[in-house]
Amino acid sequence: MILWLLIFRAIGLEMRGQVHNHMWEAIWDKAFGIASLLLALFFGIALGNIVRGVNLGMVENGVSTQEPHFFFLPLWNPTFSPQANELGIIDWFTLFLGIVSTVALTIHGANWIIYKTNSALNPKLKNVVFKLNFVLLVLVFISLGIWHFIEPKPFHNFIENPILWFFPLMTFVGIAGLFKVRSFKKDGHGFLFSTLFLVGGFASTAVSIFPNVLPSTNKVNPSLTIYNTATHEYGLNAGLSWFFVALFLVIIYFIIQYRVFSGKMDDVGYGEH
């Protein structure tokens, strides 16, 4: 779903510029918006599947019917429960995280528009961010509560390693800063705080399930971890060597991108870059 939505967004951008007609452009604008909204939703649902875990090896009646690393999930199961024997991609837990993701990315996108434009829409967007931030705060607290249904001890890594509390702190600093979005003198501050929230939230999620990268919901096959999924030592050494080459290229890429798209974008026509 994520792959197809990414493709459809790109197609929407490309098709919009093919015909200079108001109706044609309006159709593809709406198509792009719907695909973007669903993409934000499915990003959260995907994260929910990682946090919840999957039935690795497709265990039935205590017997693994597939290889230990294999799994297949239908889009949803009849019970819509994250604790069912036959899990689905969408259940009430993963859907809830999808909603959290949608609200968070809506705030982030609005802050980006405020940061990169002098649009007359910006004051309204600041009010939208301010109001949605209350919704996001409530959703975050609810998600912390329902996490106990999936993981009985969700904070064990934080308790064992108190330094990891830095990431939840970053998350709440980000969400607290967004309540002042209407009084920021610099347009980029809102985007900075929503970035802090997203980075802190993802990092908190990752360290909470560490060393797992994909938990197993059965007791027959072990969870996939950073240890049992690691490649051979030779592959790790080769990857580390090429990592620095890739990092250098990525840095150059972002420097060029920053210079091309620096400043406000109000006077940049569609498709110029």
Image (cartoon, helix red, strand yellow):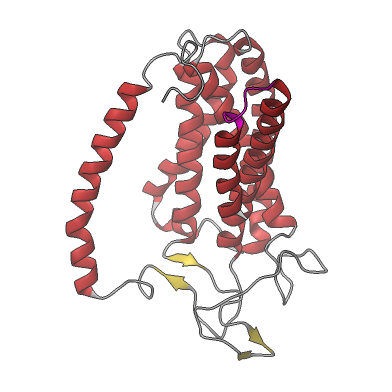
Find residue 90 and report its horizontal and vertical position in percent. 71, 59
User: At x 52% / y 83%, what residue is drawn?
Assistant: 221
Residue closer to the observer: 41 or 209: 41
Q: Is residue 182 above or below residue 30?
A: above
User: At x 68% / y 22%, what residue is drawn?
Assistant: 21
Would residue 172 be found to the left or right of residue 121 on screen? left
Q: Specify the quadrant of the image occupied by residue 258.
A: top left
Q: Is residue 149 above or below residue 177?
A: below
Which residue is outermost to the right? 78
Query: Does any portion of residue 101 appear in the rendered image?
Result: yes
User: At x 60% / y 37%, what residue is drawn?
Assistant: 12
Would residue 243 be found to the left or right of residue 84 on screen? left
Would residue 90 be found to the left or right of residue 244 on screen? right
Is residue 198 rendered magenta in the image?
Answer: no
Find residue 201 and report its horizontal and vertical position in percent. 51, 43
How many numbered circles are shown? 0
Instruction: Quadrant for the N terminus, please.
Output: bottom right
Residue closer to the observer: 243 or 170: 243
Find residue 158 and report its horizontal and vertical position in percent. 45, 53
- Main SS category, magenta section: loop
Find residue 62 and report its horizontal and vertical position in percent. 64, 90
Instruction: Quadrant for the C terminus, please.
Output: top left
Q: Is residue 37 above or below residue 86?
A: above
User: At x 38% / y 54%, what residue is drawn?
Assistant: 161
- Look at the image and give the residue range highlighted in magenta: 16-21
